[in-house]
Amino acid sequence: MLNLPTPAFLVDREIVEQNCHRMLQKALASGVAFRPHVKTHKTVEIARMQHGGAVGPITVSTLAEAELFADADFRDITYAVPIAPEKLPRVIALAQRVERLNILVDSAAALYALESAGAVFDVFLKVDCGYHRAGLNPDDPDSVRLALAIARSPAVHFQGLLTHAGHSYHARDAAEVRRVAAEETAALTRFRALLGADLADTPRSVGSTPTASVVERFTDCDEVRPGNYVFYDAFQATIGSCHAEDVAVSVLATVIGSYPERQEAIVDAGALALSKDAGPDHIDPHFGFGVVCDLALRPLPARLVALSQEHGKIATREPPAVGTRVRIIPNHSCLTAAMYDRYHVIEEGRVVGEWRPARGW
Amino acid sequence: MLNLPTPAFLVDREIVEQNCHRMLQKALASGVAFRPHVKTHKTVEIARMQHGGAVGPITVSTLAEAELFADADFRDITYAVPIAPEKLPRVIALAQRVERLNILVDSAAALYALESAGAVFDVFLKVDCGYHRAGLNPDDPDSVRLALAIARSPAVHFQGLLTHAGHSYHARDAAEVRRVAAEETAALTRFRALLGADLADTPRSVGSTPTASVVERFTDCDEVRPGNYVFYDAFQATIGSCHAEDVAVSVLATVIGSYPERQEAIVDAGALALSKDAGPDHIDPHFGFGVVCDLALRPLPARLVALSQEHGKIATREPPAVGTRVRIIPNHSCLTAAMYDRYHVIEEGRVVGEWRPARGW
């Protein structure tokens, strides 16, 4: 590990395996379907770990991911971003190569596009459980009408209701996350009840790493789709989704400037090595752009106060010397991982392999 | 352009050429050496445009860039990030393939590493002109001692003093940028005067896009190194480095959700398509994550209020329909460009080519 060129993205294989195992066991024990998201890591290796070493149903955030995982024999894929009509030809082509490619719809315009495309699509209806990003308002009568139109459309194999409790990321502790988890499942159950007896068994798919992490077991839902939990990050540890020792990734960086007179140092990990995600700044406005640690991942008394393209500026009373190596726990592992063409896999501090993620769209 | 899959990074070739021409002419008219930074675009095509269609001296932010441009016959390269001792073997190998590979030093520790490496290096001394990221304090007597030690070291071909006025990015208008530009050159000139008669002609290299853009001509310096000016962005236009019509890049995106009841829409350009740079939030805390425009680049009455990995959320009184295409001017073109493996080159709204940037470190 010490010999790697910096910046480098390190993935601790044993922690990933443990995170994967724990979530899979919870899903199995709860009797729900498990369709983990792969957008955080975008690698075939970890997607298989999410299913205990096998292929299984997955969730993706781009069609590029869907195509990569289809090539790697994943046959049951949900593309969990509302479909853009222009992407339908690519969806149709990919659907012919797998058993099922679910897409998301939350508007009459999208339904109309499906009905004009000359194919039959596997479709989840996206419901808004309070995050207010995508999805239908479950308490609006128009939403029921659209759900019924989708369920009855000849262009649709209706697969169920899907929601994402992204507002769990606004929580300040695990207790708040638990309240969001209850809203997440309640929204789908309440909405499903409005759809009538014919649709009383419609599957309800939920998923966000905070809510999936804090609940003891999955109840009041049929499928779960967490993703970030494979790596976790500084954000998740701060809001209570995980413990600090559950975070599987770090960025190895080198001190390239040391300025004791202004109690600062700079490292060779900037915005392109970490992303500019501000982390849990709703809890600590001065959280910084990652957690600076020593090589054993013990946090240092230092704050990563600024990032430019290739520089990270650290405020610390005793700046480490030029050449010192540090490990930085990223604020948001999904965004940090996406900056790298390869991950260095480590076990007990030694590099044991390399994984290459999907990129682009 | 309308047929491109989204998100897509569009580069208007004519605007880039005009931006390149203007800066090159200013350098020529000022009689200073021109060593533009290539980190914003990382493409051989634009680096040649920066020199009027030829190869010439350049500045890079990573050794990966240095190696790519060396392969493309750029022979005079400054790696403008303080050198990490571990990177010296790679520097030595690359230096043998080019005429000159300048590196940056601002500490006795780095000088010691050079002297232990068994080679002679082309070295700029980094000076802090007020940005307080890297560089020696020009008003500290210890800085003079280190400068003289570097200049006299048998491991060094001393190339000059170098500074970067990154604090120009904290300015609120062009007048403030002009004040920073004066500090930038004054810091090097003042420091050089302390080095004695032997070093009275030491070259002074300056560079930041805001300062290089607002000055009428380059004075009180010997070399300039702007980079972002090839593209500019929403940030630069806001602080007065350029006009809105000088911005050469945009992200083409598609509306994938439209929610009139909450006056919001979502597009398929999120944090991975735009970066999470907060833009000129020191001027407008609600600036948003980019400027949402129609296809003719007219700003829409809309704010890009939130980004998740693959979703951008737009607040707007009349949300556009699903399927509508928009162009988003990025806050920080360097970081946005780095998210793409290829740029789509456009001329008068038509796609005429594709450029592929360097990646990684």
Image (cartoon, coloured by chain):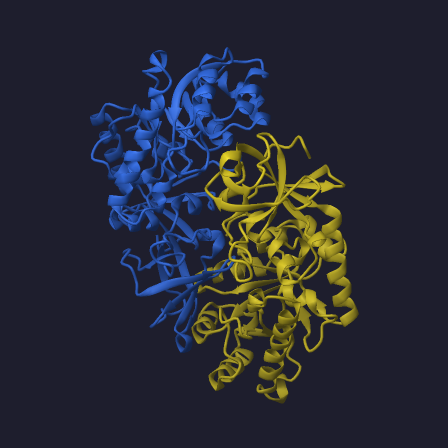
Chain colours: A yellow, B blue
Q: Quadrant of residue B345?
A: top left
Rendered position, A15 above or below A153? above
Question: Residue A92 vs residue B158: left or right?
Answer: right
Asked whether the viewer can see residue B242, the reply is no
Name the residue: 36% across, 70% down. B319
Of residues B278 and A162, the one drawn nearer to the viewer in this rendering = B278
Residue at 30% across, 63% down:
B300
Of A129 and B202, nearer the camera is B202
**Outermost residue, bottom direction?**
A197
In-image side of B349 versus A286 (left or right):
left
Q: Whole-percent x and y of residue B16?
A: 30, 40
Tally the numbered discs: 0
Horizontally, residue A202 falls left or right of residue A129, namely right
Say which of A191 and A118 sits in front.
Answer: A191
- Name the spot of residue B3 as percent of width and height, x first: 38, 55
| Quadrant (top left, top right, bottom left, bottom right) of the N terminus of chain A | top right
